[in-house]
Amino acid sequence: MTSLGETLGAVRPVEPGPMAEARAHQDRLTKPSGSLGVLEDVAARLAGIAGACPPPLPAPAALAIFAADHGVHAQGVSPWPQEVTAQMVANFAAGGAVANAFAAQVGASVTVVDVGVAADLPPAEGLLVRKVAYGTADLSQGPAMTREQATAALTAGVEVARDLVAAGARCLVTGDMGIANTTASAALICAFTGREAAGVTGRGTGVDDAMYQHKIEIVRRGLRVNGIAEAEAVPGGPDSALRVLAAVGGLEHAAIAGFVIGAAVARVPVILDGVIAGAAALAASALAPDTVGYCLAGHRSAEPGHAVALSHLGLEPLVDLRLRLGEGTGGLLAHPLVSAAARVMHEVATFDSAGVTDKGD
Ligand SMILES: Cc1cc2ncn([C@H]3O[C@H](COP(=O)(O)O)[C@@H](O)[C@H]3O)c2cc1C
Ligand SMILES: O=C(O)c1cccnc1
């Protein structure tokens, strides 16, 4: 088995040559230069990721929903009972969640991965059991995970990405399920970006004002008990990243970070979903900085920490629909845009081939 260190070392930067070629090709197509805006950036990135221009179409897409429970739920940071995590996993496996409907809409496969649900789940098609623990410890009392647990969840994510690509996926989409995971997401975003808890903590599934203030306090306490200064970004480097991830992250955050790293190793694009994915991508980029080149921000969610995470990563969201669901829903909705960006590179005529007069500069 490949060690995590070897996997991190296998991440290569996206290739600048094919990116430049993509830019030059876009300027020859029958449209004013730059007129496809962000989609031109996406297509150039796809070329850099694949190391080829035109880039391959990013299809089929595969969504992986990483599910886990959180000890910090005991602090009253979510209005929902913890067992909803396990119940939603069953719902995903039965095809009944919003993520399933959106996946069907865009032709993506759905794989659910139990990396840390507190209950044992009945076997189901499309459900992988890679359980590292029955949920995390309470991050507001001490480290949520041991380094070994965080590493095991990271490895599970890397392997799921590798296996989906081996099975034919050409674009990966991140998904999450874990009641209370917006609290852990806020703590991770604080630690990696150096922002204050109040600026990155959101209302998650819809906490009321009193629970919201309490949630901010719990994020602060989680940072403090784990020796992470508020409003100060933690030092860079993989050792510090793993410590932070284990201290205040969730098992699904670690697995999603691994999934993103696995996409980079396989040289396929990975569309990030919402705030949980944003927090996980911060961890992934701290572990292996070149992974960011393989990430596309599917959307910007209503959680304030998500915008903070994306701007720290330098990623521009493709859609902004005030979604605040998770599961991979926002990532899936962006997939047709990513495909359209790539299709332009294959199918649109050049000024020369179509006999259209260029403006001549
Ligand atoms: C029925 C239901 C379906 C969901 N699907 C995603 N989430 C989302 O909400 C949870 C995080 O919010 P918080 O931190 O406030 O608990 C995560 O499980 C996330 O994926 C759901 C939440 C619920 C209740
Ligand atoms: O921003 C998200 O992705 C989100 C928000 C609330 C609950 N779950 C996810």
Image (tube, grey):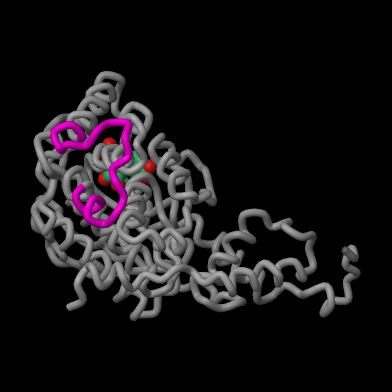
Instruction: Determine the residue positioned at 44% across, 45% down.
Output: 312
Front one among 111 and 213? 213
Front one among 33 and 8? 8
Instruction: Determine the residue positioned at 17% across, 36% down.
Output: 227
Rendering coords of residue 343 (x, y %) = 62, 71
Rendering coords of residue 129 (x, y %) = 16, 65
Write down the region rendered in magenta: 223-243
Q: Against 12, is 201 above or below?
A: above
Rendering coords of residue 250 (x, y %) = 20, 48
Q: Is residue 20 magenta?
A: no
User: In this image, 323 relative to 138: left or right?
Assistant: right
Q: Against 42, is 51 above or below?
A: below
Instruction: Determine the residue positioned at 14% across, 67% down.
Output: 123
Identify the residue at the far top of this view: 210
Instruction: Determine the residue positioned at 54% across, 68% down.
Output: 46
For the C terminus, the image quarter is bottom right
Q: Quadrant of ligand 1?
A: top left
User: In this image, 355 relative to 160: left or right?
Assistant: right
